[in-house]
Image (cartoon, rainbow, N blue to C red):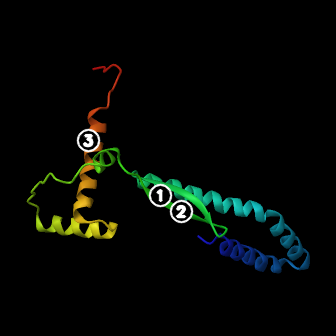
């Protein structure tokens, strides 16, 4: 995310518009641009933070942070290791399970594993661990209160 280029484009557009008002307006616009630059930079960073929140909301198994790289904000997305998968990480992969899958599902799993840079086995183990964790979270929810009929 190159905010400097965006800020420069904003300043150039505003400066071009100021030329329509004559020398006095052009001079005032230049002074104004100089005065508001820190606020515009903060606005850009705030927009990056909002983007990080939006991305994080769509990726529940990831942490999204805004980091500054070479003076510009960048979104850093890190996959969170699930509790279930972490609990099984130390175990030897000795247990076997044979599944019969539709050909299309098998192909989709292979493609998803390849896209994630995982082997099919590790991708399926991760997905099963996450599904088990979600199941346990749902099955352990407790509700209190009164139901009126």
Position of 96 with respect to 33 (left or right) is: left
Residue 85 vertical position relative to residue 40 in the rendered view, above or below: above
Q: Is tag 3's residue or tag 2's residue first in the polypeptide sequence?
A: 2
Percent x, y for residue 4? 68, 72
Q: Is residue 102 above or below residue 128?
A: below
Residue 21 rendering spot, x and y as whole percentages: 84, 77
Task: Give the structural element (helix, strand or loop) at label 3.
Answer: helix
Q: Marks 3 and 1, Cα distance to the nearest angstrom?
A: 24 Å
The quarter of the displayed image where residue 71 is located = bottom right
Label 3 close to label 2 by CB (< 8 Å): no
Lateral position of residue 38 relative to residue 50, left or right: right
Number of numbered discs overlaid on the protein picture? 3
Tag 2 secondary structure? strand
Q: Are marks 1 and 2 in contact (CB under 8 Å)?
A: yes
Answer with left or right where residue 139 lies relative to residue 58. Answer: left
Tell me the quarter of the image containing the C terminus: top left
Residue at x-position 87% and y-position 74%: 25
Name which of mark 3 and mark 1 comes first in the sequence: 1
Mark closest to the chain's N terminus, 1 or 2:
1
**Marks 3 and 2, how far apart in space?**
30 Å
Q: Residue at x 34, y 44 (%)?
A: 83
> Mark 1 — residue?
55
- The residue indicated by pointer 2 is 75
Query: For the residue carrying disc 1, how many other residues have a C-alpha within 10 Å: few (<14), some (14-19), or many (20+)?
Result: some
Q: Secondary structure at mark 1?
A: helix
Q: Which residue is mark 3?
A: 135
Mark 1 vs mark 2, CA separation in Å: 9 Å
| Nearer the camera: disc 3 or disc 1 | 3
- Image quadrant in which the N terminus is located: bottom right
Task: Please provide percent x and percent y for residue 80.
Answer: 41, 52
- Residue nearer the viewer, 147 or 132: 132
Q: Nearer the viewer, residue 136 or 141?
A: 136
């Amino acid at each position: 995310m190159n905010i400097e280029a965006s800020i420069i484009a904003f300043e150039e557009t505003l400066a071009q518009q100021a030329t329509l008002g004559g020398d006095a307006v052009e001079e005032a616009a230049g002074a104004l641009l100089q005065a508001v630059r820190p606020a515009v930079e903060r606005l850009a960073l705030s927009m990056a933070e909002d983007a990080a929140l939006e991305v994080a909301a769509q990726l529940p198994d990831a942490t999204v942070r805004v980091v500054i790289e070479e003076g510009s904000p960048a979104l850093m997305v890190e996959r969170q290791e699930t509790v279930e998968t972490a609990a099984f990480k130390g175990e030897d992969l000795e247990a076997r399970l044979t599944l019969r899958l539709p050909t299309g599902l098998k192909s989709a799993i292979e493609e998803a594993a390849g896209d994630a840079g995982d082997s099919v086995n590790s991708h399926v183990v991760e997905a099963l661990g996450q599904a088990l964790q979600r199941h346990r979270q749902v099955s352990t929810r407790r509700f209190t209160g009164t139901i009126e009929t």
